[in-house]
Image (spheres, rainbow, N blue to C red):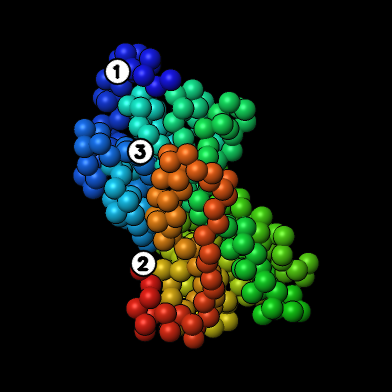
Amino acid sequence: MKNWKKAIALVASAAALVSVAACGSSNSGDGGSSDSGKKVVGFVAVGPEGGFRTANEDDIKAAFKDAGFDLQYSPTQNNDQQKQIQAFNKFVNDEVDAIILSSTEDSGWDDSLKKAAEAEIPVFTVDRNVEVKDSEAKKAIVSHIGPSNEWAGQQAAEFVNKNFPDGANGFILEGPAGLSVVKDRGTGWSDKVASNIKVLESQSANWSTDEAKTVTAGLLDKYKSENPQFIFAQNDEMGLGAAQAVDAAGLKGKVKIITIDGTKNALQALVDGDLSFVIEYNPIFGKETAQAVKDYLDGKTVEKDIQIESKTFDAASAKEALDNGSRAY
């Protein structure tokens, strides 16, 4: 089906080249080219965002290179979904063999996915799920690969339940609105949190350490009469910012801070007593992603949901992980 579209795609591709140039390089130089005989895979990526994202995207690039693919890497900037859509559509026009999508937002992908389905280009979502309403668009998605965000949120709730059996007040620091990861981590929390645990307020700090420090300082001042005892930060960077605000307020050791990701900086903060509990959201699943793409292109059946195992850390296990050098990010 791809061949008869070639002439039409060439015109659209030429136009797309201009628009996509602004969103960064679409080829990392890690692989070969379509002329080399390698399968070409387009990676619609998030780009710089923190320790998790860097580790995740570097691991995917390395795994696809090792697997013999030509991976064309197209990161966006500042979570700009429109640039991601432009990159995605260019990959469709270029008739790549497969597309990996790590979306900045979970909605708004129906039209692009429908084009991929019509061009018979399989799509693999990684890390973040997307919500698709169009039945034809859904056909493009072969598999989702990544850890469970709901599981991560559940672990945060269970830690708070265990540490505050008589109840407690606290805050939630969320990522940017509109992301499936934010909603799923919130859903996991809500599914498991005890009825005597009260969230005084939830605010977005946009995954940012600096923003989280400012937001937390404001919340601690606003609710000081409510004796806040915990902060659930949906990523490590926000948790580290919250820890700075807690320390500045003279509350270190009195407010437990829970984070998600499991970066080295967070584990060190856990050892140092600035954080209380860290939930890994394992970014190292490049091999699983490359294998899923290879299997599908080889005509094999691929699972619709490939869940990547993660774990949790207290201060002792964090120190062990840091001492043995087992953390890759």
Q: Label 1, on which residue?
A: 10
Task: Name the mark nearer the viewer: 2 or 3.
Answer: 3
Task: Check the image and report above or below for 208 versus 106.
Answer: below
Point 36% across, 19% down: residue: 3
Give the image location of residue 177, x and y in percent: 54, 46
Residue type at numbered disc 2: Tyr
Residue at the spot x=47%, y=63% of the render? Answer: 282
| Between marks 1 and 2 in the image, the one whose residue lies nearer the viewer | 1
Q: Amino acid at mark 3?
A: Gly
Q: Mark 1 or 3 closer to N-term?
A: 1
**Looking at the image, residue 244 lies above or below residue 185:** below
Residue 176 is situated, as x and y percent measured from the top left of the image, at: 51, 49
Residue type marked 1:
Leu
> Would residue 217 be visible to someone looking at this image?
no
Residue 196 shows in the view: yes
Q: Position of residue 155 (x, y in %)?
A: 62, 68
Near mark 3 (Cα within 10 A), the count class, few <14, some 14-19 or many ≥20, is many
> SS of the residue at dot 3?
strand
Residue labelled with disc 3: 42
Of the 4 image quadrants, the one containing the C terminus is bottom left
Which is nearer the eye, 251 or 23?
Answer: 23
Do residues under tags 2 and 3 come within 8 Å of each other at their CB atoms?
Answer: no
Determine the CA span between mark 1 and mark 2.
Answer: 40 Å
Label 2 belongs to which residue? 329
N-term-proximal mark, 2 vs 3: 3
Q: CA distance from mark 1 to mark 3?
A: 17 Å
User: Front-most of 213 and 134?
Assistant: 134
The quarter of the picture where the N terminus appears is top left
